[in-house]
Amino acid sequence: MSRAVALGILALLGALPSQAQTVTQTSPVVPLQSPRTGDVEFKLGTFTPRIDTEEGLTGKPYAETFGDRPMLLFELELQRYFYQGIGTAGLGVSAGYAEKYASTKTDTGDTAEEKTALKVVPLKLNGFYKFDYPALRWHVPLVPYGKLGLIYMPWWINKGGETQTLGDRAGKGGRWGYGLTGGVSFLLDVLEPRLARDFDSDIGVNHSYFFAEWTYAQVDNFGSPGIVLSSRHWMFGLALDY
């Protein structure tokens, strides 16, 4: 009887390593989130160039031609993350487009059939920092952020489908400047956590945000004479971490 018991215990002990190994192999580690490397932002807002603030101007040519209503500005920004720790920092590039049409006036002050259009293409290189540590760790939905960047803005004026001249100057060119941006994002993951996880596992989008930001842009070739394309404007949009 004791011999049978001893043999049974030995058999049980011999089986334990094999069973433990089986449990380890059938318990795969499931990653909680795919790696974050960058961000893409789609934004829309209003833009009113401060052309009438140029020194030496007589009157207000922008307001007299295009009125007081702002231009509609669309921008696309791509960001790359270089630091992820107590917040996120990196570099971003963006391109935008805005245009404004108005009726052309004749020498007698009458309205002509052809239109005058001002078009601008803001191009930016930004350094940014986002304080998203509370959002990613504790799901606090608000993420403040700031940007500092270099701006180059091509512009041109069309009249009847052709580039218009401004006195002895061609109605086109490009202006350099800088911009400061402050904003806040709302983390949409907190509204639908399960959908956010599926969004990540299916197409690699880690997080999504709605955001609002205000920009101080000084675009006047750093104080040089010429057209002033500076602005103070709001933008709103959607941001996707990937």
Image (cartoon, helix red, strand yellow):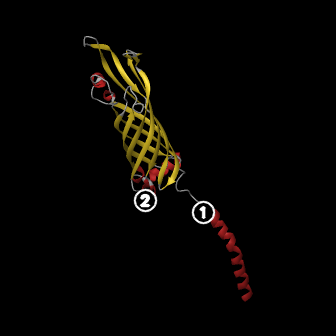
| Disc with the residue nearer the chain's start (2 vs 1) | 1
**Label 1: how many Cα within 10 Å (few below 14, some 14–19, many 20+):** few
- Judge whether residue 187 can be spotted in this image: no
Mark 2 or 1, which is nearer the eye? 2
Query: Can you give x and y, in whole percent of width and height, for residue 19 in the image?
Result: 66, 70
In which quadrant will I find the N terminus?
bottom right
SS assignment at label 2 = helix
Please state which of residues 240 and 99 is positioned toward the viewer in this rendering.
Answer: 99
Looking at the image, residue 90 lies above or below residue 67: below
Which residue lies at the image location 47% right of the left edge and 56% below the top edge?
86
Q: Quadrant of residue 234?
A: top left
Please state which of residues 79 and 55 is positioned toward the viewer in this rendering.
Answer: 55
Query: Can you give x and y, in whole percent of width and height, for residue 157 in the image?
Result: 39, 21
Looking at the image, residue 193 lies above or below residue 76: below
Query: Can you give x and y, in whole percent of width and height, for residue 141 in the image?
Result: 39, 53
Total numbered badges shown on the rendered structure: 2
Which residue lies at the image location 38% right of the left edge and 46% below the top edge?
183
Determine which residue is flagged by label 1: 27
Residue 214: mark in rendering: none
Q: Residue furthest top?
A: 108
Determine which residue is flagged by label 2: 138
Q: Residue furthest left?
A: 109
SS assignment at label 1 = loop
Distance from disc 2 to disc 1, alpha carbons, whole Å, reads 27 Å
- Judge whether residue 130 can be spotted in this image: yes
Looking at the image, residue 10 lies above or below residue 232: below
Q: Is residue 228 left or right of residue 60?
A: right
Name the residue type under label 1: Ser
Query: Can you give x and y, in whole percent of width and height, for residue 58 in the image?
Result: 28, 22
Q: Is residue 10 left or right of residue 60?
A: right
**Label 2: how many Cα within 10 Å (few below 14, some 14–19, many 20+):** few
